Image (tube, helix red, strand yellow):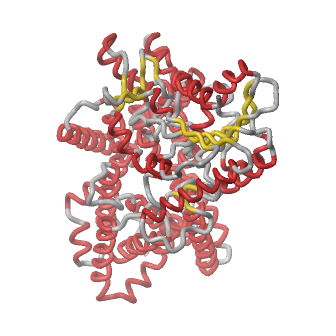
Amino acid sequence: MMSPNYYRPDIDGLRALAITGVILHHYDVFFMPSGYVGVDIFFVISGFLIGGIILRGVEAETFSFRIFYRRRILRILPALLVMLMITSIIAYWILLPHALRYYGGGLLTAILSLSNIWFYNRIDYFNPDTHLEPLIHTWSLGVEEQFYLVIPFIILMLWRIGWRGIWLGLSVILIASFIIMIFQSRSNPEAAFYLPFGRFWELLVGVLAYRLRPSFLKICCGSAKWIAGLSLLCLIVFMTMYDSPTWPDEMTLFPICSTALILMLGDRPGPAKAILTAQPAVFLGLISYSLYLYHQPVLVFARIALREINAVSFWALVFTLTITLSVTSWRFIERPFRYWQAPAIIWKMVLVGLPMALVAFAIGGHITKGYPDRLSPELRQIVGYVNSFSETYKSCLPNRKDIGEVSAASGCVHGADVAPDVAVWGDSHAAVLTHSFGTALVAENRSLKELTMSRCTPIVGLYLTSLKRGEACVTRNDDIMSYLLENKNLKWIILNSPWANNLETPWDLQPIEGWREMDNPEEYYQTVIDSLRQQILTLTTNGRIVILMYPIPFSSQNPPEAFADLVMQEGDTAVSMGESYSQFRQSQKTTFETFDALGAIDGLVRVYPHKAFCSEPKDICLTVDARRPLYFDAGHLSLEGVALVVPILIEALQ
């Protein structure tokens, strides 16, 4: 076994490879498509080192929970808290209220080592783009800290049976965690990525690698250096050549096992050691924790604040700031706290004062909804459009996780106090219409039934494969179809969805059993057309009139926040904002063609809501008109935007 004081520079070199992969992946560098594997490498290294500390202490009967957790706190928290302080100051000045409010949730959970839970739960339809979330990278720290919380207790309990108990117990937990990961990667990829249950096996591989190291060194002997070198080569090739739409999955075994072999054999003289112990690699490994902490917030804030800067200057600035902050953090925060060199007053300020201040800041941001008083009244009004949806929007839009508790019969009714004769079938993009549409129907003494579910495309039998719990959409649509056929008073059926999300990329939609014997995109689109045509025919032959809403333009950015930025730059001269009409038609070309291919069907009415937003001669589709955002985010219409669509629907009902 390794001595407690035995320093292995090759492990720092391995950290350098891991952090390089993570950063290049986040920077969208094309030759590192699987740079995210760097996080998995960090997990195995953590398991190896922390497992070694615990196993040595248990075997020598000197293990102390107090000393163990104090060392973990001093290793992780000071640099993290200082980063959170710097990030929070910048966030206060450059984030708009809606984003700052959600930033506070990430801040609070990062302090509590629960940010992986936060980001798993917040990836839903109502929240901002997580690619602009400065603290999303702290999810991996949450996984590690949750592991640190439980692994000493597990090892100490198993130690009562001896080494055999530790081997058996940890192996069982490792296998169980791996199996959970495999199931989650197929049914709930976000859970596999963020939650600890499917990640602990990676850290446990590191723990077992520490224990296996002496045996491997004896067995491999002269071939150790070549095995380590080949493992390093495999790791680099994997990170540069492999890419996967979901991670982790069964392929994760390759980088995990390669990392474990390097940890067991990498300090033997050979090519792996020569590469990993090179001075630049070791230094990069030494500052890797601070690099990990700062690379994401620097990138996010640069994207927000430096939109007009050219690419070369942008990346030069991002790189320089990241390195400068990381080296400063390592030199003046990490090392002094880790080696007990910081004065007592600094200890108290960082470990007591900072968490209290940051928690207060996060809670205050939630209560005030993002400290809106920072902005002028005009900007507050513009930014306020991020909440420009009806009071029933969220309460009447069920989530897929609630599929067993909701039914079509329980859907909301909007409009006059009469039995509904109109049904709106779709997802959240349909849900934003229903309240205002129902209000307009009151004048005709009519009402509508809302039949929506988030992200569920209103095509019977099909669902988006990329969705968490996407299969619930098939159940929901079957229920809606049965409900519509049973309720003959529902004569008008309106279908609406962000169709391009589903139709512009082949194979996104599929039935439960998957596609069979389909070789090209044309077959896919024809199958979707046939499914939609059959659905419409089923309704129309049963006396219903189907109103098919063609696509509404998307925005490339969040209109309220983007327009607020524009107003801050241009003042009163900023009146409107929009996207290219020709680009809209090109991006939705397949969708328009698919709908047109349905042909003439008695009882089918087509409506084109994009005409209320777009001018073909001016080549523009407005996202902001007369300083009023027509969307509350990049895809959903605000109440102002809905007001443009409702008259089109009322006319279609005539």
Residue at point 33% right, 37% down?
582
Query: Taking 98 as reference, is 277 above or below it?
Result: below
Instruction: Give how far across and how far down residue 386 sits, in percent.
Output: 51, 26
Give x and y (percent) for residue 600: 55, 48
The x and y percentages for residue 106 are 51, 38
**What residue is at 35 percent from the left and 77 percent from the top?**
265
Asked whether residue 365 is in view, the answer is no
The residue under the point 39% across, 70% down is 259
Quarter of the image with the C terminus in it = top right
Camera-side residue: 441 or 59?
Answer: 441
Left or right? Give the position of 582 relative to 629: left
The answer to whether residue 256 is seen in the rendering is: yes
**Snapshot quadrant of residue 491:** top right
The reply, left or right, for residue 411 in relation to residue 300 is: right
Q: Which quadrant, please, contains the N terminus? A: bottom left
> 150 and 229: which one is in front?
229
Residue 525, image x and y in percent? Answer: 48, 59
Which residue occupies 82% across, 27% down? 418
